[in-house]
Image (cartoon, coloured by chain):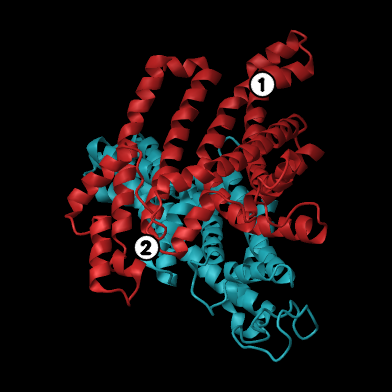
Chain colours: A cyan, B red
Amino acid sequence: MSAATTVGPARVSTWTRARGNPAIIAGSIICLILVIMALFAPWIAPYDPNKQMLGPQLADPSRAHWLGLDSFGRDVFSRIIWGARISLWVGVVATVMAMIAGSAIGIVAGYFGGAIDRVISGVTDILLSFPQLVMGLLLVAVLGASIGNIILAIAITAVPAFIRLARGSTLAMRERDFIDAGRALGFSDMRIMFAHVAPNILDEIIVMGSLWLATAIRTESTLAFIGLGVPPPTATWGGIIREGFEYLNDNYLLAVFPSLAILITMIGLNLIGDGLRDATDPRAPQ
Amino acid sequence: MLLFIAKRLLLAIPTLFGVLTLVFFLVRIVPGDPALVVLGDQASPAALDALRERLGLNKPVLVQYADYLTSIAHGDLGRSLTTNRPVMGDMLSVLPYTIELTLASLVIGLLGGVPLGVMAAVKRNGIADWLARIVSLIGLSFPAFVSGVLLLVLFAIQVRWFPVISAPRSGDALERLRALALPAINLGVIMIAYVTRVTRSGMLSALGEDYVRTARAKGVPARAVVWRHALRNVLIPVVTIVGLNLGVLIGNSVLTEIVFSRPGLGKIIVNALNTRDYATLQGMMVVFAFAIVVANVLTDLVYGLVDPRVKTA
């Protein structure tokens, strides 16, 4: 082991392993394409996603409209490209919010223990007693369907999982010598928790975050499919599927194309999440 | 064992209490006056007052909370705001459909996932292992409504093997089975993905254990070592994953019921969401949360059966 790796052996080996993992490479390529699609939607999409064309409604794919037209005569390909924006934005913001809030609460619970831990763990158990999707549905129904409320609802459903993870990792970390050393040096609890414990459990939180990103995007599209998504005419994948579902007998392709977009995205994110988990798992073969 | 069950049940009480409290306050943070939401802007003040009176909205919140806890203790989930029927009755009338669907998907998940996971671990990096990885990746990637729509397009619209509307009780047992098939496969594939993963990783570590080597050294046939000795020790994580995923299964069954036009709890929830029937939503949340808490208790009890050491711990 070189001098450089002794500074933080677990970290270096984890990310080195992650870089060579074929699943992560494949997943990253898929996600990169998705991010480019979302960022450059105005330039990539051939048409305005909300513009109604003169062609027949529910038209089949053609050279002018690669994936056909929807029931309002809008270009499906352009709508799917613009839909990537909503899915990614909602997914990333909700996951990051849940990661930050959940980890902070979990670290506090694990670090202090005692009554604080009992209260936090009790509330976490209660929140985990609700099916994630049903809880999301109720929250959006209560708060109202807007992009901000959808992000908030998805983040709230994800927070308990991060609390539990961060708490467990902090419990293990609390017994380590460097935490005792920090205390002996007179560091404040805040400094130990967020400058010393947090960086050491970051790997696990990021792995969980990558898996939750897929869940968050899935929840967003599900809410849209049920009719509780970002209100129309904004293009969302779940919304396009919902519309296609109503015309399943007339033109099922309208439901199939956005379904494939979601499926490919989920596969990409799950490949990254699984690859990261394998790379950070100390029991996995080196 | 009795003491273990009693202890576990007692531990569930605070969680259940917390769940009930959370649902109560969640439903009450709805912006605006629920009576106005139900009756609309055109309603007369007298009608609004009458509805508030009926819903108990004119009482102090703490009194409403006490009433709510008392009625739930009596098995009363309140009345629907739109139909005025008891929520409990509505739920019980469709519960068999949801239970039928959930059980069928669990059976598919276990019958498909356990053998696939075992074969993947025994022949690591072989064909079965790759198949297992692909199946579990795809199973975990599909949102339930997406796989449902694709199954519907393929097997009910393209090749007409199954009905588009899976409302059962429309004929004999065979018809019911045909109606159940697509929704159950839709949920079952997701369960297969979870079960395969857990079985595979559990078997991989079990096959490296000393007792497996001892059994092999004693000349126990390879098949018996895998299926009788190693698999028995993998059952705990499999039970855990099934128990833990009940929430996922419930969420997905809601979507599956919508896609396949099947009666069930999912349809009640979506109807309640569309009509802003908060009384029904509140009742359904209580039912779902109860189901998950009970499933957690049952999971722990099954541990006791699968692994006798758990009881004494």
Which residue is depicted at the point 72% across and 21% down? B226
The x and y percentages for residue B128 are: 78, 38
Which residue is depicted at the point 44% across and 30% down? B297
Which residue is depicted at the point 32% across and 44% down? B20
Which residue was labeled with disc 2?
A142
Give amino acid for label 2.
Answer: Val
Observer-nearest of B154 and A236: B154
Q: CA distance from mark 2 to mark 1?
A: 49 Å
Q: Marks 2 and 1: which is nearer the front?
A: 2
Q: How many marks?
A: 2
Q: Quadrant of the N terminus of chain A?
A: top right
Image-based side of A171 in relation to A88, left or right: left
Question: Which chain is mark 2 on?
Answer: A
Find residue A188 and name its label.
none
Confirm or deny contact between disc 2 and disc 1 (CB under 8 A). Answer: no
Which residue is depicted at the point 23% across and 59% down? B53
Image-based side of A64 in relation to A206, left or right: right
State whether residue A87 appears in this view.
yes
Q: Residues within 10 Å of mark 2 (few under 14, many from 20)?
A: many
Which residue was labeled with disc 1?
B230
Image: A214 above or below B65: below
In the structure shown, which secondary structural element does the residue marked by tag 2 occupy? Answer: helix
The x and y percentages for residue B203 are: 66, 28
Give amino acid for label 1.
Answer: Ala
The x and y percentages for residue A151 are: 43, 65
